[in-house]
Image (tube, grey):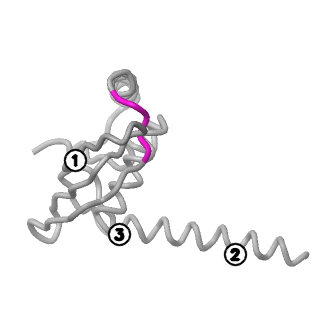
Amino acid sequence: MPLYRYIVIISMLLCLASCEDKTREPAGALEIALEALNRGDYDTYLQWVDMGSEMDAAQKSMMRHALKQHLEWRRAERAAVASIDMIDTQMQGDTICTVYYQYTFADSTKEVASQKMVKHGETWKLRLRN
């Protein structure tokens, strides 16, 4: 096998390993979820959300529709998202925390927000309920 194929395979494995490690930290999991939402990948975003119970197909479809409407509204109100930066993580216990993050838009405006996160096993998920 040519050397460049080994390099490509090793690069892919390293990328997968770094993505997996990100999910073990609340800010990393939130970053993955927000980036998926920003690019309109609602199914990936929903994988990172703690809904309290499993959603059936109809509920997932309704959530995808609501997310799409929200994203369309946000894009109509604001310039495109240029970056999403994690600012701080404040732990409220071993399995709950709040992550503070900042959107930077293409027009250089910034918006700071927070997201409560909950730990499920070894990974963190967005908590949308109290």
Name the image quarter holding residue 93.
bottom left
Residue type, numbered disc 1: Val
The tag earlier along the polypeptide, 3 or 2, is 2
55 on left or right of 1: left
User: Residue 79 colored magenta?
Assistant: yes
Q: From the viewer's perspective, is residue 63 above or below residue 93?
A: above
- Quarter of the picture containing the N terminus is bottom right
In this rendering, the count of numbered labels is 3
Q: Position of residue 127 (x, y in %)?
A: 21, 48
Q: What separation in Å lies between label 3 and label 2 (alpha carbons)?
A: 22 Å
* Figure quadrant of the C terminus: top left
Amino acid carrying label 2: it is Ile
The span picked out in magenta is 78-82
Identity, as a three-letter code, of the amino acid under mark 3? Arg
Question: What separation in Å lies between label 3 and label 1 (alpha carbons)?
Answer: 23 Å
Q: Which residue is mark 2?
A: 10
Q: Is residue 52 left or right of residue 3?
A: left
SS for callout 3: loop
How far is the residue under mark 2 from the one under mark 1? 37 Å
Could you tell me residue 128's position as x and y percent? 20, 42
